Amino acid sequence: MTLTMAEPMCLIENGNDGKLQVIPQALKALAQIDQRVVVVAVVGLYRTGKSYLMNKLAGKRKGFALGATVQSKTKGIWMWCVPHPVKEGHTLVLLDTEGLGDVEKGDAKNDIWIFSLAVLLSSTLVYNSMGTIDNDAIQRLHYVTELTEHIKVKSKADNEDESIEFVRIFPSFVWTVRDFTLTLEFDGKPVTADEYLDKSLQLKNGHSKKVQEYNMPRSCLRNFFPSRKCFVFERPAATEKMKELSELSDRELEPSFVEQANEFCDYIYNKAEIKTLKGGIPVTGRLLGNLAKVYVDTICSNQVPCLENAVQALSQIENANAVQRAVAHYRAKMGEWVVFPTETQEELSQIHGTMVKEALKIFIENSFKDEDQKHQLELMKVLQKEYEAICDKNIQESKKVCQSIIKRVFQPLEDRLSSGSYMSPGGYRKYSQDIQNYIRKYRSEHGRGVMAEETLKEYLEGKKKTGETILAADQSLTEAEHQMEVERARTRALEQEKQAAKEKAEIYERMIKDQQHTYNENVEQLLKKMEEERISAMREHERVVEAKLKEQHDLLKEGFKEKAELLQKDIDGLNRQREKEQVESPSLFSTILDNVGQAASLFLPGILPKVGGMAVSYMSRFFK
């Protein structure tokens, strides 16, 4: 499910007390989006035309507020959710942030939190500036140097440099330069906008304070955002028209600007990745809203947002919701497809199997970091209880239907009993023949369900004394014939008992098979998810190592051999960590499956032979 918003709405604002707060209506809007999201946030100094680019990405002229004065129009963080124009089944979430360095606001602390939130929530961060990428422009991006003080990756401090982990979770970085007037060339040779950015981020040799101040923001940008892209835009229109920029059509803008804007949009549409958490966990709109709330609540409590804590808190919320959604789906679909009573237990079993698979799929797709498979086991337990209740209802409904059929079919017999017509010579044989005829008629009826023979057995047991009375009163039978009829009645009663027992055994055996099927389905989907997570983690590792290798290559090229050697230690450490994970992975899988099997056997007694005693108890719950 997705959401198409007609216009932007505020996601995070400054409350009257000066503290940031998430808008409840925005959370409700995001909660409606089950699709994976591509989140593009734009940051930059106030009055640099950020909002125009975001409107362009939304395919609209108007939406995010544009201003033509020195006043900043955007306050807090505003969002606009639209169907992704290229990635089918995805939602594009655009975040427009208030201008950094607003003269009216004059709150540097607020600026760094807005910048940090944009980094934490987005999958692509667009930094918008005016003029050129010179030293002044880079120094104005000093917020990037403060990220290590305002974002933590792990809850417990260790000796590792957390900035290494930033590469795993930080968005890709796009620098857009507005009103660019220079010619893209170095030493008389043309260069691309990306080469222009890389050249601007080159470090200087030396250890003086001035050199360190020069290198600091550049090093942070290079280390934290290895995926970098640059776009330059010429002035869109003459000065007198800039006040009406949102009213101008493409034909009224400078052709070169229109072309550059289209190239920017095409890049974002085709290259911007979905938002993920550490480990490659995909983020939906609902998860994005919860993520924003967790981060803002942490900031308001005067703490530094910690990704590990946030993911842990979110996993509890999302996994509990995933269980609820899966159970709700199972209940709804079983209610829709099951018509009581089913003709056979097999019929009910097939519907149950299909719905369990669908429910599990919903849970797997909407859960993550389910430590010890706690929530998946809870889902298995709840679905088993739901199925047991449905089976019990199926049994009871079958009994009701069968009792109604028996009442109708055997009514002539009851009438004759009431009139005493069997209490005469030869009456017992007539009674016995009628009973068999009505039994055959009863068994020819459709829609009796799974308890047809059990209900018939109960009815016939109720007629045992009546038959004995009629037999005793029938003076036409010799002693030998009387004894023969007694044996025949006993044989028929035993046969009926066998039929009823067979019927109950078939139900029980089918339910035991259903338990095994449910367990197998859980294991299959769990293994599939674990494999997907393993592949995601591997890709994340490869992306981080590739980024580090690229940075190492650039450092060597620029003459920073010592820095490149230090970076090699980071790369070696990452590779050792990956090798360790690969060695431990098979035993981890085995341990998880063992734990799931042991825990599941407590409420699925049919899956493990060693709990056969529990199976007997389980069976007795249905056939008391």
Image: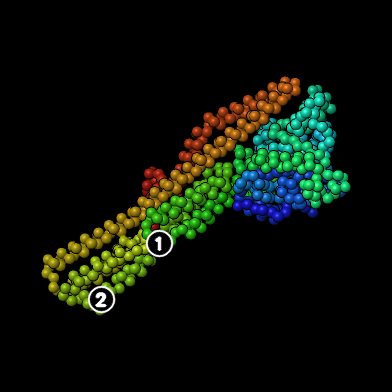
Residue 102 to residue 28: above or below: above
Q: Which residue is mark 1?
A: 341
Give me the residue at 33% from left, 71% from top.
Answer: 407
Q: Residue at x 59, y 29 (%)?
A: 577
Mark 2 vs 1, N-terminal side: 1
Question: Which numbered mark, 2 or 1, is in the foreground of this view?
Answer: 1
Q: Is residue 495 left or right of 80 when viewed as pictured? A: left
Mark 2: few, some, or many residues within 10 Å (few <14, many ≥20)?
few
The extreme bottom residue here reads 419
Amino acid on which the number 1 mark rests in the picture: Pro
Q: Quadrant of residue 164?
A: top right
Q: How many marks?
A: 2
**Displayed quadrant of residue 608:** top left
**Marker disc for residue 506:** none
Q: Which circle marks residue 416 in the picture? A: 2
Q: Secondary structure at mark 1?
A: loop
Q: Position of residue 5 (x, y in %)?
A: 69, 54
For the residue pair 520 and 464, the one nearer the viewer reads as 520
Identify the residue at image location x=79%, y=54%. Answer: 16
Q: Does residue 238 appear anywhere in the picture?
A: yes
Q: Is residue 296 among the parts visible in the rendering?
A: no
State the CA–CA distance, disc 2 to disc 1: 31 Å
**Image coordinates for residue 87, horizontal then vertical, percent:** 63, 44
The answer to whether 134 is drawn above or below residue 62 in the figure is: above
Position in image of residue 403 (x %, y %) = 35, 67
Identify the residue at horizontal 81%, vertical 43% (top origin). Answer: 254
**Front in this rendered view, residue 153 or 85:** 85
In the rendered view, tell whether residue 377 sits above or below residue 396: above
424 with respect to 460 (left or right) = left
User: In this view of the protein, which residue sits in the foreground, 206 or 179?
Assistant: 179
